[in-house]
Image (tube, helix red, strand yellow):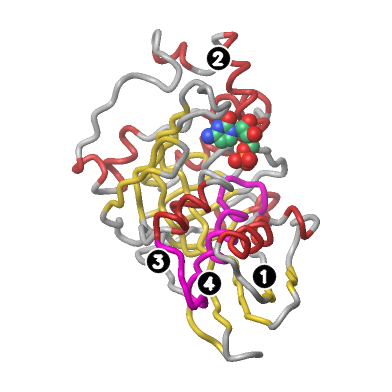
Amino acid sequence: MSELAVRVAAQAKLNLHLRVFPRDESGYHPLETIFHRIDLADDLVVEITSGTRTLDVAGTGTGPVESNLAWRAASAYAEHNRWPGGFNIALTKRIPVGAGLGGGSADAAAVLRALNSLSPSPMPAPRLLALGGSMGSDIPFLLSDAVMALAWSRGERMLSLPPLPRHDLLLMTPEFSVTTADAYRWLDEDRARGSDGRESMGEQPPGGEAIAFDLLDLSSWARIAKFARNDFEPVVAARHPELSSYLARLRSSRATLAGMTGSGSTLFGVLDTPPDYSKVPEEHRARVTTTTTSIDVVQPVRVG
Ligand code: C5P
């Protein structure tokens, strides 16, 4: 391995809270979300080479190289920062794919951070955030130095928040996955029909009632649990009814906060004590991952 190589743990994220507002003139839906990093991470090693550009992926379900977000991020960085040479990226997938945990975005953010740390002329943070944001709503947060953040617009505007205490985390990834585009389309369809779960909240506008966050509301897992919701939850549950029973099980366990992350399909439970596998039905055990919530951002480290 050359001297110019770095290793990055590409941490996954949870959306503890996610509200989606009506599509705007750009064709996208503005968001309001609370992101939190978790310790489940893909492993990336990025090495500078004299000319070749390669991506090797170990793990499952990532598709062709050209559509891999890590590859697209590296190519975009090379173009925007006039990177003259090549790079080898070795990616080991651990984060479930298409599951709402930001796996692809975590890889893209990790590649951008790695290349910027190796570059003789690093990009200033706002340009790097803008470049990441042009590739997906989760990337700016995962590029930032925030463990937890309140983010809005398309995720590129955010307020970093004090991290919450580390907790055990149980992740349950159902057998079905949900594409981001489908989730937004379903939300629009259900809202047009008035069947997006708002009837249970009275006549609320899409995205819900006005809300004024207080820093205190965001200062503990239990306080966040009091208001947290995910607008995608009812629309995904309407198409995959098993989601509701999985969620009910998580909520009736010892989870301080439980919900669906992103557009799904992974469900999470933030636990006060380590998970008890004997309580997880045997047929679901292969779909359960245990990890912890993060208390810091893992920085790229030089290797070689
Ligand atoms: O970000 P990504 O390319 O994965 O998004 C896929 C699709 O989801 C977009 O083409 C758009 O239709 C929809 N989307 C949206 N609002 C967002 C993010 C995505 O409508 N904030």
**Is disc 3 surrounded by few (<14), some (14 to 19) or many (20+) residues within 10 Å?**
some
Which image quarter: residue 296?
Answer: bottom left
Real-space Cα distance between discs 3 and 4?
14 Å
Amino acid type at circle 2 is: Arg
Q: Earlier in the sequence, mark 1 or mark 4?
A: 1
Confirm or deny contact between disc 3 and disc 1 (CB under 8 A).
no
Q: Earlier in the sequence, mark 2 or mark 3?
A: 2
Q: Earlier in the sequence, mark 2 or mark 4?
A: 4
Q: Residue at x 62, y 47 (%)?
A: 99
Which image quarter: residue 68?
Answer: bottom right
**Is disc 4 surrounded by few (<14), some (14 to 19) or many (20+) residues within 10 Å?**
many
Q: Which residue is mark 4?
A: 114
Amino acid type at circle 3 is: Val
Label at residue 297: 3
Instruction: Please name whichever residue, 27 or 250, is drawn nearer the observer in this view of the structure.
Output: 27
Instruction: Please name whichever residue, 106 or 41, is drawn nearer the observer in this view of the structure.
Output: 106
Amino acid type at circle 4 is: Ala
Q: Earlier in the sequence, mark 1 or mark 2?
A: 1
Instruction: Please name whichever residue, 32 or 233, is drawn nearer the observer in this view of the structure.
Output: 32
Q: Earlier in the sequence, mark 3 or mark 4?
A: 4
**For the residue with label 2, is its CB less than 8 Å from the closest atom of ligand 1?**
no
In the rendered image, the quadrant that contains the N terminus is: bottom right
Q: Which residue is mark 2?
A: 191
Q: Is residue 279 magenta?
A: no
